[in-house]
Amino acid sequence: MKYVVKLFVIFILMVIDSGYAQDKSLQMPLSFIAENLEYKGVAVKDENYTIWGCAPIQDEDGKTHLFVARWQEKNVNPAWRKSSEIAHYVSDLPEGPFVFSDIALKGTGKDTWDKYAPHNPEIKKVGKYFVLLYIANNNYHQPPHPDNQRIGMAIAKSPYGPWKKVGKDGLVLQANNPQKWNYKSNIGVANPAFLEVNGKYYLYFKTKTTDGVLKYGLATATKLKGPYTIQDKPVTSNKGTLEDGTVFAYQDHIFLLTTDNHGQNTGIVGGGTLWKSKDGINFNLEEATVGYDLLPTYYTDYDPKKAVKIYGIAPKLERPKILMTNNKPSYLYGPSGWNIFGGDRTVGHVFKINLNE
């Protein structure tokens, strides 16, 4: 309880000092993640690369693997959709240090749906296979969040690869079905999150409805490689923008953790929303809680005069991903568009989730 009070006080002081917006009327409670986050440091940094999504998984030897979106340019946009590649980093411990191992995926550079920029990595283990999901596009000159974003899948028996794209070319999901609620979504489908549920495969994704409302959707399959069928309606009852979902099963529920970039769900601009569902199909805002706060809440040495804004409106966490150990959420990983240490490159952060069980 003392930590909860401290967390709240730190955030209030931060808001007063920095002017970050919040909507006090929403009054969303803190989740068990937000109450128990401990900042552990930098998981991934590279002076030659901009670091973005950091998807974690552990192997049978206890090593932790991060699949990281990265690119050489210092800008975020349009580099993420032009030059992103998915790199593989390894550590003996979840908290790092992580060392570069290899490149898992790059754009084909050919006339394919994934010509450019594999991005938004998601990694899971299903049976004997490591399953890597990602987005890509075939024309990075389109608007910042283009309608040619699609979701692909590659599998390997080792986190070191080799990675084999499923089916003909790895493509498993797109917004091209005129009978579905996201037909011709002007952002396509993006931000994949994956979970095996009672023998079925659940693929969550960010998209837009036919009238332009941003939602999270769900596509399901009875076989790992698909085909994946988009369900009849969105799964989230969000207000305004949400993205960057990660999903996990815990205590007989399915949790979906998303960003809240404009604070319309949690009241915290740049915070996270933790959605809770019994079936993984219906996530109601009334049952949601604050998934996490802004970085300065947890990094107590934060100095606004030292922080460097590279991308985004606040020192917020992007692309949150959860590492599960012993069937419970143990670590949270994610980059930020702000370098809180003063560097000119983004880095990936790691937090421990201190659950008293």
Image (cartoon, rainbow, N blue to C red):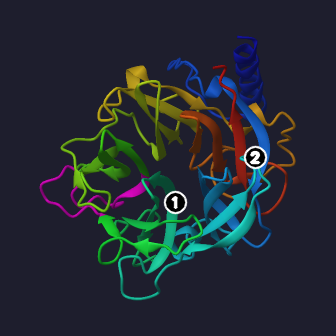
Residue type, label 1: Pro
Rendered position, 93 above or below 68: above
90 or 108, which is in the foreground? 90
Specify whether residue 191 is painted magenta: yes
- Per the image, the residue denoted by label 2 is 95
- The x, y position of residue 57, in whole percent, is 58, 51
- Per the image, the residue denoted by label 1 is 121
Q: Residue furthest top?
A: 1
Q: Look at the magenta stretch and give its main secondary structure.
A: loop
Q: Nearer the viewer, mark 2 or mark 1?
A: 2
Residue 276 seen by the camera: yes
Compared across the picture, whether 97 is left or right of 182 comes to: right
Name the N-terminal-most of marks 2 and 1: 2
Specify whether residue 278 is painted magenta: no
Residues shaded magenta: 173-192
63 or 279, which is in the foreground? 63
Residue at point 40% right, 65% down? 153
Residue type, label 2: Glu
Dot 1, how many residues are within 10 Å of its Cα: few (below 14), some (14-19), or many (20+)? many
Rendered position, 136 above or below 67: below
177 or 312, which is in the foreground? 177
Residue at point 49% right, 40% down? 258
The C terminus sits in image quarter: top right
